[in-house]
Image (spheres, coloured by chain):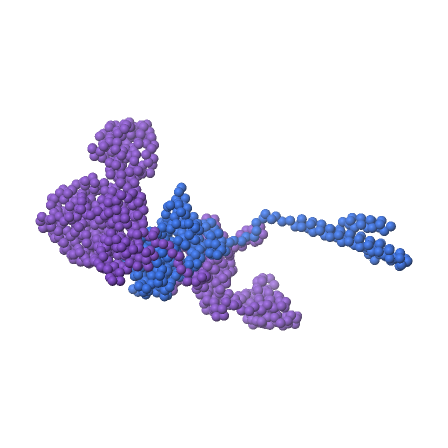
Amino acid sequence: MLDALKDELLSQVNAASDLAALEEVRVTALGKKGRITGFMKELGGLSPDERRERGQQLNALKDEIATAIDARKADLARAHLEARLAAERIDVTLPTRPETEGRIHPISQTIDEMVAIFAEMGFSVAEGPDVEDDFHNFTALNFPPGHPARDMHDTFYLPDAGDKKMLLRTHTSPVQVRTMLNKKPPIRIIAPGRTYRSDYDMTHTPMFHQIEGLVIDEATNMGHLKGCLIEFCRAFFDVDDLPLRFRPSFFPFTEPSAEVDIGCSRKGGELKLGNYGDWLEILGCGMVHPNVLEACGIDSTKYQGFAFGMGIERVAMLKYGIPDLRTFFEADLRWLKHYGFVPLDVPSMAQGLTR
Amino acid sequence: MKFTLSWLKDHLETDATLDQIVEKLTALGLEVESVEDRSKELAPFRVAHVVSAEKHPDADKLRVLVVDTGTEKLQVVCGAPNARVGLKGVFAPEGTYVPGSDITLKKGVIRGVESNGMMCSERELKLSEEHNGIIELPDDAPVGVPFAEYAGLGDPVIDISLTPDRADCAGVRGIARDLAAAGLGRLKPLMDGPLNAEPVKGSFPSPLGVSIERPDACPMFVGRTIRGVKNGPSPKWLRDKLTAIGLRPISALVDITNYLTFDSARPLHVFDADKVKGGILVRMGRPGETLKALNGKEYELDGEMTVVADHERAESLAGIVGGEDTGCTDATVNVFVEAALFDPVRTAQTGRRLGAESDARYRFERGVDPAAVVQGMERATRLILEICGGEASELVVAGQEPEWHRTLPLRPGRVASLGGVDLPRDEQVRILMDLGCTIEREDVDGTLRIVPPSWRADIHGEADLVEEVLRVHGFDAIPATPLPRDSVLTRPALSTKQRRVGLAKRTLAVRGLSEAVTWSFMSAPVAELFGGVDAGLKLLNPISADLDVMRPSILGNLIQAAGRNADRGLADIGLFEVGPAFRKPTPDGQDIVAAGIRAGNAVPRHWAVKARGVDAFDAKADALAVLEAAGAPTANLQVTTDAPNWYHPGRSGVLRLGPTVMARFGEIHPLVLDTLGVKGPVVGFEVFLDAIPLPKKKGGTAKPLVQLSPFQPVERDFAFAVGKDVEADKIVRAAKGADKALVKDVAVFDVYQGPGVEEGKKSVAVSVTLQPTDRTLTEEDIEAIGQKIVAAVAKATGGSLRA
């Protein structure tokens, strides 16, 4: 008889289509007036042996029904949730809420890369004013008055300040002068910054950026200059076997002086950096002229060292394939988005210079 | 500086190939710009003979020629006015690339007549600018021979870029000497042919004398009269030499001076002696004086310019260009030859002031060999006598050879200690002697006492001598040595202030602004919009009126950039720049400013969020983010409303730390935008990075201990009715000050004006966070603190709690 009840109750449980119907089944079976509860109440009238046996059967039935109800309840809840979630569907192809990320200008990124490399070689960054005087820009750097080399600089002049001829620095070399005047050797600095020359065409802008390096101590010679620049160029351009060629040249503030070419190929009108047999000039350098040391209060019989300077836009153009110098200063958002760098791409030697 | 291979070989005995020579020149610091082998480019062009010339049946100005090319007779249509029977010229067959006009010839039919090539002008062959007619060659020109070979153009032309110190290499001889020193051959003595510098004995005293008024401007002047010359075209060897390097042969007398200018960097001048009145006087120009020069220009002279004059007037601009009045012509019979020394600086200044370029100036401003004045005169004399005939006078010498001997020390060890390459003493001596130095003596300690040659005014000290040795030995031979490190670990390369610049940039970029780099200049009218500039910051020689002053603020440039971007369809834009703004023309007169602008929509139209335009709070947020990134104590900043007048007076603010301005922000004034032609709204900010105090590092790197309370924080909202002009910040500060220990945060979450709030007042709702540290707050505690807050706000603002 209990087997029939069990089958009946289980089929009711399984037939319950929602939580309310299921509760009704539960009350019918297990409620105070439920059918199983009813059988339980009748136990008192049985002999102890019968009661024990009947009791066990009823408890087993009760448990089985209760378990079935719980299972059904969970099924119904899951089905209900599934129905709700199905109704909550959104169109995930819609665009996200607007966010913009800006870009870092290639000049800043390039300077950061250079600083990362030179920091490894013990250089620190020095800076100086853009508005300079004739002494710091020329005289202390061994440009004799009237020398044709001054001519080559296309200087922008400002009104004289007293007896000082004021100008916009034509190179970052006056930072060398200011550093040497203020600091005793050993000196190992780089000086990135804005520079100005009165020239505006396809390959010249009236403002551009240079980085200057200066090492002064008692022993640094031209071999160190070569070593330093070879390391730098190979790291910066990310070409391990990049060849460098040092050609004798002339700058008033260095002696001996050299211009440096890096290896490249121009085959098919495409510029490629590497050991391909052709050459491309990228920087000027040399051993600091004794006259410059003396003009900056440094004993040239005891101290010596090297200096170098290069155009930041020029090497950025080479490294990143940017074709036109003038576009650097136009603040064209399309250009900045294309050639700029994501803000968290901070160059470091440990994490990598170039993504 | 251009020269040909054969010209070089006049001075250099060598077996080296062109490639070897070119490579060595660059290695010596005589950077080869180009090597032009015209015989290759001109190979298809041949000497041809015009056999017949008929008028074109269908065009008045064209002729139909039959041209004998040496191998065949071809019909050619030609428009040159001088095309005629019997003419010998230069013919290019179809398929030839014509360098002067950058075209490749095709077989053509011109007005119905077939044309199988072209008779060429000088311009088409890039020989000169001449294009009025086709080239006419002498009657004896051999038909069919390649033109380059006939014209002596089969000689490679080498162009080197000369650094300003190498005056000696402005002549072929100096270049040859460098190559010889570097092991590429032997320098020939000045003995034979056009190199012959043997003195010519004068047979009469020069009728024209020379006097020098200012020895500092002209230390030495050597002159000589040559009478009975016959001027005319130069011989072919001389014309070919000049033509090959792009100089136009003029007449024998002029060509000889040009030849010596390029051969030995020894400019000379030849006056027509019959036109010189009285005698030669080297003096300063006179105010109001003018000179008609041989280049067709007329120059106004002044007292700073050296002139060579006769007793009436200036006859040449010393060291730059001769005068027309005393120039030589084909009719010239008697000449006066000048070989002089002029002050390099004065020559450079004069040339620059007058804008007068010349081959002579190029050499005088670099410095002409002071010991070779007479030698140059003798070579010129010999050439004139040989080519033009005549009879030479004795020399007239005014002034004297300036002292150029100087003795410089060279410790042979210096080549290693400065140059980084160990070179034996004997090789150092060999190099220096090949360059023309003499060894005066050797000290007991091994120091060499070196006298550099007269033509190397650029060698002044030991470093220069080291460079000479290294240069000739080759920079390639210097071993690359790593820079020794003085610490194992890399130390920071940036100071705190420098680091802030990078942090500011990357913070702003993360916030959606893109970094621009704009000119440090702007136009004076734009600068006026941003407070104007000091008179000392106005450029004396601006590149254009747009860029004539140093910028007092970066904003003007960024706003203009926004305008340009808007013109290209990018109206919603954020730009920033971290760079200098200029106050005074002194080293401390420029500030590092992080400035930025936002224009158009801050939130564009979007399906999920409401669009809105940029407002002052966007700019304020940017400014605060930069200050925070740079380490400014942003919690202690005050906001004042006295931003400068390029901001909207009611929608702008200044962030201060005490009296110091850290930043300003707000909407850009609509009149500024109007003037710049930019559509608003545009908001902007300027953060003065240098004004931010440096962190105090007294306690090392440790941060203050943090107190994290285990007790539940409580939030309570208060809405105050206050006067409509009361600044929200006052309420916040008052609420915070009500109980500094307990009130953790006060945030404004609503500002309302309208129905339900009394006229002239506004409602400001704040959420106050209370954070107990020693026990959980009871309702009574909260009630008590609430009353303190209401009282404090009432006291500070006169406001009351809204019912």
Residue at 43% over, 56% down = A117
The location of residue B183, given as percent across then percent down, is 27, 48
Visible in this render: residue A9?
Answer: yes
The location of residue A348, given as percent across then percent down, is 47, 56
Residue at 33% over, 63% down = A303
Visible in this render: residue B524?
Answer: no
The location of residue B396, given as percent across then percent down, is 13, 52
Residue at 58% over, 69% down = B707
Q: Colour of chain B?
A: purple
Q: Chain A is drawn in which colour?
A: blue
Name the one closer to the observer, B544 or B68: B68
Q: How many marks?
A: 0
Q: In this view, does B241 lie to the left or right of A12?
A: left
Name the one closer to the observer, A285 or B306: A285
Q: Quarter-wise, where is residue B457 in the image?
A: bottom left
Q: In this view, does B788 lie to the left or right of B424?
A: right
Name the one closer to the observer, B104 or B567: B104
The relative height of residue A287 versus residue B243 in the rendered view (above or below) is: below
The location of residue B465, given as percent across then percent down, is 27, 57
The relative height of residue A79 versus residue B794 in the rendered view (above or below) is: above
Q: Quarter-wise, where is residue B711 in the image?
A: bottom right
Name the one closer to the observer, A5 or A103: A5
Q: Quarter-wise, where is residue B150 in the image?
A: top left
